[in-house]
Amino acid sequence: MTSDLHLAQDDVVQTLLGLADLPMLLLDPDFQVIDFSPQTLRLFPLLEKNQKLNQALNAELSAPLYKLIDNGSRTTGPVSLAVHHEITPNQILHLTWKAQRLLKADGSTRGYCLTALDQTYRDKLEDELKKSFRQIRDQKMALDESAIVAITDQRGVISYVNDTFCRISGYEREELVGHTHSLLKSGFHGPDFFRDLWRTIGSGRVWKGEIRNRTKAGDIYWVDTTIVPFLNEQGRPYQFVAIRFDVTEKKQMQERLEKERMRSMYAEKMASLGELAAGIAHELGNPAASINAWLDVIESQYERQNLDLNMFMQTVPRVRRDAKRMRDIIQGMLTYARDGSRDPFQSEGVLTILQQVSDYCSYKLRKCGVRLTLEVPNPYLTVECRITEISQMLVNFILNACDAVQELEDRWIQIAAIEQDGQVEFQITDSGSGIPQDVADKMFQPFYTTKPVGRGTGLGLSIARSIIDNHQGTVALDPACPNTRFVITLPRLHQAESKDWTQEEKMG
């Protein structure tokens, strides 16, 4: 026992125990506690010296330690054992105990040193890491099943593609990795599109948009794309992750709907042109008759050999005026009849547009006894538009108003155009007393009409609204007006739709 006490009083041992930041127990050969480090009390607050190990600790804790010591007594090296200790009902520590047999000079056992390494926090981190790994694995699996995924470096060179990318594009993984997305270039998007894309992600911002690509077999497909830049410590992108979804069917459906809309617009335009045909003939008939009358006079004088040259020269400007009138009417009708849906937006004079529309409808207005007045306080007011579409829209409102008031005693239509806050506001007012709410709620729906069968297609107002929407404008009834008034607002300057696309087709 003296040697054991000497062991406990050894200066080196005492120093080591005092400095140890781990739980450490010194036992004599009979498993009696000789000394321990201060950290040991954190685990066993009631621990005292000169106690047997099974007295200092309960059987649940001491049994595995006895086993560990027993294993350690068969070797001169340390042995270890992982043990879970329940400190409190809510706190369980995972400790790895190590046992080292201490020898005397003659090789007999002097005692034992037990050291505990707390692995609770490490185990918690491992559990969290495994949980995070499972979540990432599951998320990746879900993403790979539903999305087209690619990773590129800062130059746009592909370093990873998932199976869905290969299946949609028709390329093998080996054909894509190490190359840029220019392999998929369809030629649909211009350089500005991709310049903007690279400017966006190059500045560390997320880019979103739709891109048309081409498969290895040459087929076209559309992808709804999100490109996320990953930034280094200096805030510069070092790689990009592109997540795409195949939206080819949606784009094809949109194209079919757009073609159907254009067919409907053209059919409605031809229907209104047919309604205006009598007026066109009348408008052409007047200057034609005038020209013919002047030619009769000149021919008669020539036959009598008394041609008056002064009168002839005075006649020429009048004939030219009538011919110009006919040419303008024909040109206006040709312009009105053509498909202008793809025309560029150009600055047009508002007063000129309204005068042309008034000419188109003049015969119908006279036939129905309807007075049309135009109010444009600023004769130089302009609007950027597609004139053929705006003309069609205004003609439709005038013809509808004409039909609505033709049974009234007081029949009139007024079109006012004013500039307000960078917009042009058209107010189309007629002498009617308004539109019932139930009709107002449905009048812009396709094929809805209140006219008798055979008198309307039900597409006019729907197409008019579509034209206004395409011009970034609005249309509404004015509930404060005692008469029927539509208010159409168009921006004076058309804002080109932002192209969410950019530089070289590396990320196509």
Image (cartoon, rainbow, N blue to C red):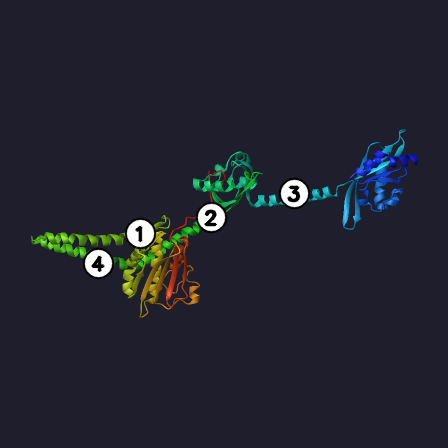
In the image, farthest residue toward the left = 305
- Whether residues under marks 1 and 4 lie with C-beta atoms below 8 angstroms apart, the answer is no
Image location (x, y in percent) of residue 276: 30, 59
- Residue shown at 76% from the left, 50% from the top: 90
Q: Quadrant of residue 432?
A: bottom left
Q: Amino acid at mark 3?
A: Phe
Q: Nearer the viewer, mark 4 or mark 2?
A: 4
Residue at numbered disc 2:
251
Question: Does residue 321 appear in the picture of this structure?
Answer: yes
Rounded to the nearest angstrom, the CA distance separating label 4 from label 3 is 86 Å
In the image, farthest residue toward the right = 1
What is the secondary structure assignment of the residue under circle 2? helix
- Whether residues under marks 2 and 1 lie with C-beta atoms below 8 angstroms apart, the answer is no
Which is nearer the N-term, disc 4 or disc 2?
Answer: 2
Which is nearer the N-term, disc 1 or disc 3?
Answer: 3
Q: Quadrant of residue 96?
A: top right
Which is nearer the N-term, disc 2 or disc 1?
Answer: 2
Circle 4 packing at 10 Å, graded few (<14), some (14-19), many (20+), is some
- Whether residues under marks 4 and 2 lie with C-beta atoms below 8 angstroms apart, the answer is no
The N terminus, quarter of image: top right
Rounded to the nearest angstrom, the CA distance separating label 4 from label 2 is 50 Å
In the image, farthest residue toward the bottom = 409
What is the secondary structure assignment of the residue under circle 4? helix
Residue at numbered disc 3:
133
Q: Is residue 128 left or right of residue 461?
A: right
Residue at numbered disc 4:
286
Residue at numbered disc 1:
335
Question: Does residue 447 appear in the picture of this structure?
Answer: no
Q: Amino acid at mark 4?
A: Asn
**Res 14 label:** none
What is the secondary structure assignment of the residue under circle 3? helix
Which is nearer the N-term, disc 1 or disc 4?
Answer: 4
